[in-house]
Image: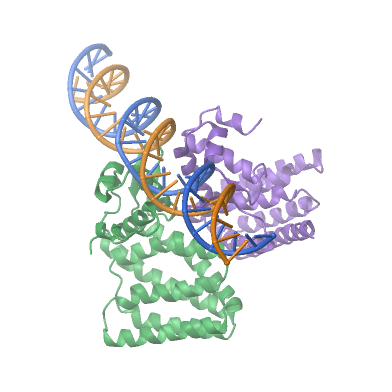
Chain colours: A purple, B green, C blue, D orange
DNA sequence: TTTGGAATAATTGTCGACAATCTGACGAGG
DNA sequence: CCTCGTCAGATTGTCGACAATTATTCCAAA
């Protein structure tokens, strides 16, 4: 299904649909990193006026997928090792915090659901070994649930709506579906156990390591790609 | 000088000036917390069309000063003890990180300037004891410089452009100019020393305590205000 | 050939008007 | 008397056009 066709099913408002469509297009590289965003061109492409488009662009800037300069237009961000490190420094800190808070605030039922989620992923992973399902959707689900479990609205909004699209962009564009899958699974399991034991400090530490390992993985790929 | 008159001196773009003006109006309570934002009314008040106004509102939402619901309008946020705690949880974590990074990345010259800044504040504080200068502008300067010293662009943008206006809103609206001034000064001094010694861990710890104390201070005021 | 600058083209910012949606009042029916 | 549906008013979302700014091209002079 092409990106344009996604616009056919009505969501809520035109700029909402635009946002989703362009987010996906940028994350998946359909709109190349570093390329200039032409408002007239995008407006024609998505069959809308520039008003909702500009609103969508404002929100894209919010999640760091584009960079705007007044009176000079917008560009899709570029992926660099330096930005990756900066991004993951933040992510480590914030998801570590999310773990500590989740250990305090998550209901037993939520923890149970998280365990079931992980078991589902294990089955799926065994069935279609090597496919990138787990890395993309599954890992995302896992992190999202813990973030939501923190019950901190600012933290939730920040990670889910402002930072995670960039994280996904790095992963998708560098084709991150390698051998870290099974190892990531074990790390996830350990984090859940810590949260279930209400050991926020340990969950924090494990999450930081988990994210640090993920960063290293991407870093290697990114550096080899630029050789 | 009234808020409207600020619009007379041209900044860069109309929505930029609008943003600054409305930010100030909300932070200082001129537009009451919880009140509904009427686009036509604000457009008339600031003598602009709704296009730049809506752009400004989008950015206000970004720094959590207003909350928008599609097809239902925007409201100024309300100040609650729960949100205050959520906000300061984030702030502690992020400024702690900023301290660790600043201890790594700040140039000697930047540290020296930070020291001079603090000395200036000490003089000012002695001269006009009791005035709220230090708490508002001085404290802000101090924190901003450390954040900038982290050299992490995402962290800088997040704290300076998205979170700090809310922090200021709590402080201004609750009239935070009390007896914490001199104590805060000592805490600042200790943090600088830690950064100068390149002891990121200590600076982190001290900053977390500093912010925690500040939060407690506001919390007390906020609870007594709601009695 | 290269450089400087002016004219031109293209893009962004802003405007006023129209369409879609929500809010609140009013009245009919239970 | 209360509930529900309808209608008017107001508000938000979207559109196409104009103004202001920036980028580009082209020509002239050194």
Image coordinates of residue A11 in percent, x first then y, are: 50, 32
Q: Nearer the viewer, residue A34 or A89?
A: A34
Q: Nearer the viewer, residue A153 or A189?
A: A153
Which image quadrant: the C terminus of chain B? bottom left
Q: Is residue B28 visible?
A: yes
Q: Quadrant of residue A195?
A: bottom right
> Residue drawn 64% across and 43% down?
A31
Image coordinates of residue A194 in percent, x first then y, are: 64, 59
In the image: residue B115, left or right of residue B81: right
> Residue drawn 35% across and 83% down?
B182
Which image quadrant: the N terminus of chain B? bottom left
Q: Nearer the viewer, residue B214 or D24?
A: D24
Q: Is residue A148 visible?
A: no
> Residue drawn 70% across and 57% down?
A190
Task: Relative to D17, say whether A133 is above or below.
Answer: below
Image coordinates of residue C29 in percent, x first then y, are: 25, 11
Question: Total number of numbered labels?
Answer: 0
């Amino acid at each position: 299904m092409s990106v344009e066709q996604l616009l056919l099913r009505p969501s809520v408002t035109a700029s909402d649909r635009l946002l989703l469509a362009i987010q996906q297009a940028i994350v998946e590289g359909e709109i190349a990193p570093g390329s200039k965003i032409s408002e007239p061109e995008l407006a024609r492409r998505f069959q809308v006026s520039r008003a909702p488009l500009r609103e969508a662009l404002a929100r894209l800037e919010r999640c760091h997928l584009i960079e705007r300069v007044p009176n000079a237009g917008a560009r899709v961000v570029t992926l660099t090792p330096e930005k990756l490190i900066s991004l993951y420094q933040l992510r480590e800190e914030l998801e570590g915090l999310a773990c500590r808070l989740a250990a305090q605030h998550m209901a037993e039922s939520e923890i149970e659901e998280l365990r079931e989620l992980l078991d589902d992923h294990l089955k799926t992973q065994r069935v279609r070994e090597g496919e990138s399902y787990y890395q993309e959707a599954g890992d995302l689900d896992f992190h999202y649930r813990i973030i939501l479990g923190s019950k901190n609205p600012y933290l939730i909004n920040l990670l889910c709506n402002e930072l995670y699209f960039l994280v996904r962009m790095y992963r998708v564009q560098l084709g991150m579906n390698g051998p870290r899958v099974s190892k990531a699974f074990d790390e996830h399991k350990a984090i859940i156990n810590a949260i279930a034991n209400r050991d926020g400090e340990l969950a924090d530490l494990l999450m930081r390591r988990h994210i640090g390992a993920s960063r290293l993985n991407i870093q290697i790929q990114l550096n080899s790609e630029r050789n």
